[in-house]
Amino acid sequence: MLCRVGVLVSGRGTNLQSIIDKSISGEIDAEVVVVISDNPKAQALNRARKVGIKALYLDPATEKPILVGGAEDKYLQVLKENQVDLVCLAGFMRVLKEKFISEYKWRIMNIHPALLPSFKGLHAQRQALNSGERFSGATVHFVTEDVDGGPIILQAVVPIYQDDTEESLSQRILKEEHRIYPECINLLAKGKIQIKDNKVIIGEING
């Protein structure tokens, strides 16, 4: 049985597209069943609708970067109505609260454009450039209440060149995001991920 994936988005949805493409091609044992956005103009919604995936705008009912009260309940209701097994954040620009995280404990993934735990938060690529680092990359991790601090699943490293701009570095990182995010989803779908002592262990799970 395919893992049923719900994706939360805010913008262009290029990571969503990579997940959809690899799902449709059968490269991963997962199916995107619903896409939810806090932005009614998100291009990601159109990407989902184009291939017949349910795509909804849900008003988060707050200007602050966090889901609160009834808004969070609305998001949870839609995910549960669509029998979602795994929630993936793909450029979702809001912070999830304790209730949401506990409802899908160890079943929420996020992609971050840096080698966590370095350069958490916004503008990670700019942070990496300004630091003088020679390498950056992408990280897929489980979501916890510690923002960008959950257990790391996979990472990909990219070099930082002396003439890099924030845009050129972002594009190089994005290519790796598109590769490793579906891979992480597939690992979970195949039952090859477990958590021990707040660390991700990848391999066959017995029993």
Image: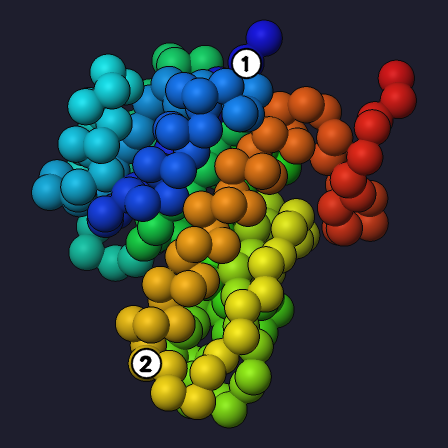
- 43 left or right of 97 in image: left
Q: Which residue sits at x=72%, y=25%?
A: 191
Cα separation between marks 1 and 2: 40 Å
For discs 1 and 2, the disc positioned in front in the rendered view: 2
Q: Which residue sits at x=45%, y=28%?
A: 22
Position of the C terminus by quadrant:
top right
Q: How is the image coloured?
A: rainbow
SS for dot 2: loop
Mark 2 or mark 1, which is nearer the start of the sequence? 1
Quadrant in which residue 43 is drawn: top left
- 16 left or right of 187 in image: left
Q: Which mark is residue 187?
A: none
> Residue 184, position in %: x, y?
60, 39
Q: Is residue 134 visible?
A: yes
- 152 left or right of 40 in image: right
Residue type of the residue flagged with mark 2: Thr
Q: Which residue sits at x=54%, y=25%?
A: 28
Q: Which residue sits at x=49%, y=89%?
A: 131
Report the front residue among 193 and 56. 193
Q: How many residues crowd mark 2 within 10 Å: few (<14), some (14–19), many (20+)?
A: some
Q: Which mark is residue 2?
A: 1
Vertical side of 62 occupied by 25: above or below: above
Vertical side of 80 occupied by 202: above or below: below
Quadrant in which residue 185 is drawn: top right
> Residue 30, position in %: x, y?
51, 21
- Per the image, the residue denoted by label 2 is 165
